[in-house]
Amino acid sequence: MPGVAAFPTRQEFCLLETTAGAQRTVGVLLIENGAISDFRLRSDWTEFEDPEYLEALSDDFELKLRELGGRSFLDWMEETLSGFLVLSDRELARGRSLDELYEDHVDAKVLRYETHLPVYSLRAAATKFGNEDSVEVENWKRVPGVRLTEGMFIARVVGRSMEPLIPDGSLCVFRAPVVGSRQGKKLLIEQFGSVADSARYTIKRYTSTKNYNFEEETWDHAEIRLEPLNPEFESFTLGPNDFHVIAEFVKVLE
């Protein structure tokens, strides 16, 4: 049976704008093949007139999108909105996500460690949080839904050993330094010496066992084990001087 040709998706966006006072962009609508697929509006309306009405917009839009469907909802908005709220002309999204479009057009202000975190390569993160050296930030990226603090950062993780929690190629949020016990935590680790030949940087679940040294009256590591989540990969052990803990995994960003 011959295959059915798939039509390419035409992805566009338009902006929701207020016309009261100085015209301002307050939301983005993502449009796929002529139908609204998703949208995002501001969450803070305190500086606008009639904030109660504006705060209710997101719930109202969600309801209309479910009831009318994406195409009819877009038609309704283009025919109905006028005066206080208007839609801009459509533009090609060119592969940008809804969050990227929102940041570009609605809220481009970067509040470091309040709304945005720095993006580092893994090598730069290891340098900064290992030697406390100054390293170049690739860019600052918005992180919604997480309480941010200094020492947190974003890095891209390559590899399948922590799937399904961390898909290959994910941008992930980390927190440094790691405080308290490391036991059971998912840690970003830099490996040294011969153990680093296959992968210098890795994320694994950290487990260790300790023996009490009666002579020194201290607890010494008997074994440090790094465990993957993906059963296709094997755990391995490291000596105390074979690695450096860079940071603790917080969440997958995208």
Image (tube, rainbow, N blue to C red):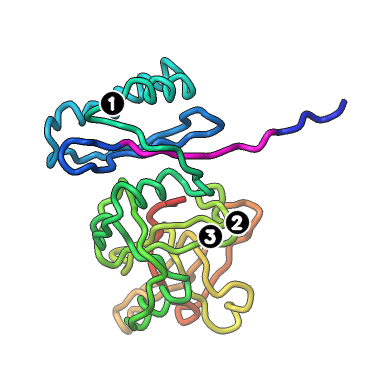
Q: Mark 3 and 2 residues: CB-CB less than 8 Å, in contact?
A: no
Measure the C-alpha gap from mark 3 to mark 2: 13 Å
The quadrant in which residue 5 appears is top right
Residue 179's tag is none
Residue furthest out toward the top: 67
Label 1 environment density (alpha carbons within 10 Å; few <14, some 14–19, many ≥20): few
- Closer to the N terminus: mark 2 or mark 1? 1
202 or 82: nearer the eye?
82
Q: Secondary structure at mark 3?
A: strand
Measure the C-alpha gap from mark 3 to mark 1: 58 Å
The magenta segment is 7-16
Amino acid on which disc 1 is placed: Ser
Label 2 environment density (alpha carbons within 10 Å; few <14, some 14–19, many ≥20): some
Amino acid on which disc 3 is placed: Glu
Residue drawn at x 58%, y 67% is 236
Q: Position of residue 18 (x, y in %)?
A: 24, 36
Check the image and report above or below for 15 versus 223: above
Q: Is residue 241 left or right of residue 77?
A: right
Q: Secondary structure at mark 1?
A: loop
Q: Secondary structure at mark 2?
A: loop
Check the image and report above or below for 62 versus 211: above
Q: Residue under circle 1?
A: 82
Amino acid on which disc 2 is placed: Arg
Label 3 environment density (alpha carbons within 10 Å; few <14, some 14–19, many ≥20): many
What secondary structure is the magenta-colored segment mainly?
A: strand
50 or 204: nearer the eye?
50
Q: Residue under circle 2?
A: 160
